[in-house]
Amino acid sequence: MSGLNASLAIALSGLTAEQGALEVTTNNVANVNTPGYSRQVPDLVSSNPIIVDPLTLGTGVTLQSIDSIRDPILESRIQQETQTQGQLSSLVSALQQSQVNFTSGSGDIGSAITNFFNSINQLSASPADLSVRQGVLTAASNLAGSFNNTANNLTQQENSLDLSVVQNAGQINQLTQQIAQLNGQISNLQNVGESAGSFVDQRTQAIDQLSSLVDVSVIPSDNTLTLTTSNGAPLVAGQQSFQLQTQLNASGLHDVYSQGADITSSITSGQLGGTLQARDQQIPAIQTQLDTLASGLANAVNGVQAAGFDLNGHAGTNLFNPPPASGTGAAASLSVAITNPALIAASSDGTTGSNGNAEAMYALSSQAVIHGQSPTNYYSGIVFNVGNDAANASAEQNASGLVLQQLNDQRASVSGVSLDQEAANMVQYQQAYAASAQVVTTINDMMYAVINMTTLTG
Amino acid sequence: MRVNPNPLPDLLAALGQTQQQINTDLQQISTGQSVNVPSDDPSAAAELVQNAAQTSAADQFLRSLGSVQGEIQSADSTLSSVTTALQRAISLGVEGANGTLNTADRAAIATEVQGIQSQLLNLANLSYQGSYVFAGTATQTAPYVLDAASPSGVDYVGNSNTNSITLGSHFSLQTNLPGSQLFSAPGSDMFQSIQDLLTSLQSGTGIAAAVGEVTTASNYIDAQRVFYGNAENQLNAQQTYLNGDTTQLAQQQNTLAGADLPTVITNLTTAETSRQATLAAVAGATQTNLFSYLK
């Protein structure tokens, strides 16, 4: 009897195990579209045998555990590449916006410089003509205007990037709180020896999202994870999350603080890193070059003005309002100081018909007055730098995108749910279940036979 | 070996790339330019800045050249009139030197020489578009004024400065000769010679010497006219050069930034075809799995 009961128990273990395995398959199928989900595999293990002398008898099957199939090294590489991708995507979008200011068209600084010098050449041909002189003032005013516009556009862009910084910090804080919470849930389960399965998937997903925002260093410790930025500012330690704060600095932009320390310049990757790089390095560098051009040009023109004589025979005064001595803000504040066309100093000998000083002013267009380059050459250098930075960042972004795509493919091949495979498994478990059920039926018949064995006589 | 069971993200990424290619091609076709933002080709964009500046400067040089040409031609034709007038004075002087004339006849000739004197004053005070051409750089006032106290009958109130103008990247041209050099240079003072002729006709003596002075002055002015002839030649040559330069700059611009339409259109067609194929693949590839076949 114990033999049959034992068989029944074994068949029952089969039913239970196959049922459990089927549940795992069903869960996989239900989660086929869940982002970050790692497929689960039932770990069916033969139950410990018993020894009934002289035989060792098996006791059936146990569903020992449900394992999530994931490759932690691959996931860590994906996180690294996601950080790079995030940084590049925000950098590329900022640079592409900046470079619109430097497309050749009719309002750009390059044409304004050329038009200004053209008006000076016209002045050289007719130095006493008031309408020609007015033309010079108009061209100078357009030149100042184009510098002002470009500088203002770049400043506005800095401000909108600043908003992104604050937003990103907020998103980071939300994610670190989420991760800390998940850490808690995971360690609770793992401390009692359970597999934390889908919680780990959710945490990995959250870390991926965090990686796209900021550079993240993952340090596993017993049953939990510590997250810091790559320069060591703490983000998550176990169940505790550390919030980032943003504070206004002296330039009216927000700096990022962690635990009271300013970590703005140490954030190197992720969207926050890219935005900060654009806001604090790339765009200010363009502004500096513009300021150099504007102040160099204004000072050179003013210098030539002072060396000549206006229509009334007086020494020339400043054509442009003198830019700041340090040069900072010269492009945004460039403006024309003269409204009376007679005050343009075209004359080199004090007479009304002399054009010697106008010629000297025209010569500035080909002299090395801006850091060893002519004004147009210097401007074309700015155009090249802006375009080159944007093109390089874009190329890097494409390359990084391809790498990330390939890593995701690899991850999917390891952890992705294959509906074909799950269907096949389902068939497998179903047949095993049917077989075990059939065994139960058979054992039932055998028991019936045994019971009725004793009533057959008479 | 397990493979990626979900090809959709890759296909969608490929679709995105193709769409981007299509967008770029459409932009090139609609603008006709292959470089629409600096990042399209940074070094071409920088060269285009230079090209645009040079083209615009060349156009300006042509404009300035036109107004300088007008002034030079006006000065030159005025000098031609001056020479003609001086030649007339010379023949009048020769006539007046004839010993058979009486005082009344010489007085009549003197009157005509006086007329020439006024004419020369007007010619020397030529004004072109509001500026006096022979005044040096003091172009707002007439360079020659009548002065009875002066030996030549006039005073020169201009100066002896000259203007030059840049009309090319390595080309500049002097644009004027002051009257002090042309009409009242020491030893060849046109006004002095005419005044002397007048005086000699009125007095009856020294007419031959005076005619000699006028001849010297006339020859001198003829020689000075070479300046204007040279200037006109140089301006014409520079004009031809600038026109050729602008053509060449336009070609350079096209090379740097012009969209090669046949190539772009071919690329667009290829990209469209690729996009269609990818869409069909996306639609077909993921329709069925094993679940569809299980009963």
Image (cartoon, rainbow, N blue to C red):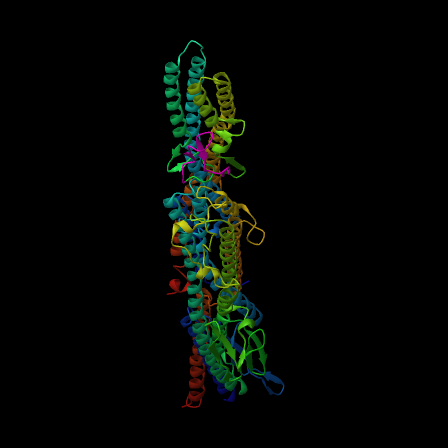
Q: Is residue B286 left or right of residue A197?
A: left
> Can you say whether B11 is above or below B143 in the image?
below
Q: Is residue A79 left or right of residue B291?
A: right
Q: Is residue A18 visible?
A: no
Out of A421 and A78, give the one closest to the viewer.
Answer: A78
Residue A45 location, quadrant: bottom right
Q: Residue at x 53, y 51 (%)?
A: A378
Picture coordinates of residue A77, whole percent (x, y) = 56, 67
Task: State which region is magenta.
Answer: B140-165
Q: Is residue B152 magenta?
A: yes
Out of B109 and B247, give the one closest to the viewer.
Answer: B109
Count of all numbered marks drawn on residues in the image: 0
Q: What predominant SS class does the magenta segment belong to?
A: loop
Picture coordinates of residue B209, whole percent (x, y) = 51, 18
Q: Is residue B143 visible?
A: yes
> Can you say whether A269 is above or below A12 in the image?
above
Picture coordinates of residue A304, whole percent (x, y) = 51, 51
